[in-house]
Amino acid sequence: MSDKRDYYEVLGVSRTATADEIKSAYRKLAMKYHPDRNPGDKEAEEKFKEAAEAYDVLHDADKRSRYDQFGHQAFANGGGGGGFGAGGMNMEDIFSMFGDVFGGRGGGFSGFEDMFGGGRARTVNPNAPRHGEDMTFKLEIDFDEAIFGSQRTLQLKLPAECTECNGTGAAAGSGRKTCRTCGGRGVVIGGGGFFQVRQTCHACGGEGSTIEKPCKKCHGSGQITKPTEIELKIPAGVFHGSRLRLAGKGAGGLRGGQPGDLYVLLSVKPSDIFSRDGQDLFVDIPVSPVVAALGGTISVPTPEGEAQLKIPAGTPNGKVFRLRGKGVASLRGGSPGDLDARIIIETPANLDRRQKELLEEFAKTSSSGTFPAAQTFANRVRVFFSHREKLKK
């Protein structure tokens, strides 16, 4: 899995790319590297496979969500989706998908025919149901919510079918008429020769028809903005950049079409106590010089509560103790991560007279062996300056 390129990099799109952008990027690569256009070119064939593999994952909302969270590891060991190796797609699968994307009927180069104008254009039914668009919502959550999970109520304004025209976009007593520009096909054909490219009709936006008298409530769009309340469950263990999918909670469909999905992109605030790397947590524990010198038991905060940690006498500043299994819960149901507690020896402050006297007395009774690190450093400094004097002569 480690030698695979990032799927977003393969298609040349950003991690926030829409479904249409992903599809468009794949179409360009598939057209460029299709085996029928590059006979005998093994490198082009591999790029064709690579692009198909990336598209197979990123165009599917479930697979994409898993990939965004776990990368290629999400599909390791038969995890489903992605990969032409163990249990992955074969060339027949790719050509089938290729035909679906390009509107063709087969795996060969004929898969381009509709795209380039070679097939018969179909008249668009203006009353056909239309699927709602997927929507993305950014949500900032506390660090604690990411660790323990939480329940949120989202107050959103989402596109919904217009109640005045029932999604037709036409005013009462009015309707739609066939678009004069595209003749009701929703597309126009440009270019010449083999590369005749079909493009969405600019006059009707691909509908194949235009509105005689637009609905006053939705201004002909067929949709209005509607306040919506959505319950969101944030699972324990999410991290900064996680995407949660709420099926059917996106923009409403038109004329009976199914609604799109809602994707919630999480942004996690920093913690005042912990730092995090994946499932592992890190915390700095202030410790008095007395405890560090004599040893003792300190309390370490963990997601499960306070843990008692025994530190030995002579514990140096910066010493790290690892608490196994005291990190963040796994989204995939595995074992939690670890927690690393770093000892930070705190210099005494706000001393009263008696405390100062005791420290002075301690200093008088100390020897070079009391602070071995300082003694070692002083010895090295003396050697350095001695060497310097010799070099000057």
Image: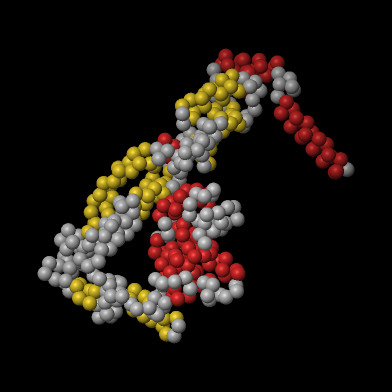
Q: Residue farthest to the right?
A: 393
Residue at horizontal 66 percent and vertical 23 percent from the top:
314
What count of labels does the image hold?
0
Would you say residue 12 is visible in this rendering?
no
In the figure, is residue 378 to the left or right of 2? right
Q: Residue farthest to the bottom?
A: 193
The residue nearer to you, when weighing 108 against 210, is: 108
Residue at horizontal 39 percent and vertical 64 percent from the top:
20
Q: Is residue 104 above or below residue 166?
A: below
The coloring applied to the image is secondary structure
In the figure, is residue 354 to the left or right of 113? right
In the figure, is residue 223 to the left or right of 171? right
Position of the C terminus by quadrant? top right
Give residue 205's position: percent from left, percent from top: 29, 71
Residue at horizontal 46 percent and vertical 31 percent from the top:
303
Give residue 224's position: percent from left, percent from top: 22, 59
The residue nearer to you, when weighing 108 against 137, is: 108
Q: Is residue 105 above or below residue 295?
A: below
The residue nearer to you, when weighing 337 against 122, is: 122
Would you say residue 392 is visible in this rendering?
yes
In the figure, is residue 16 to the left or right of 5? left
Q: Is residue 191 above or below residue 4?
A: below
Residue at horizontal 25 percent and vertical 77 percent from the top:
179
Give residue 275's position: percent from left, percent from top: 51, 38
Image quadrant where residue 203 sits: bottom left
Give residue 94's position: percent from left, percent from top: 48, 64
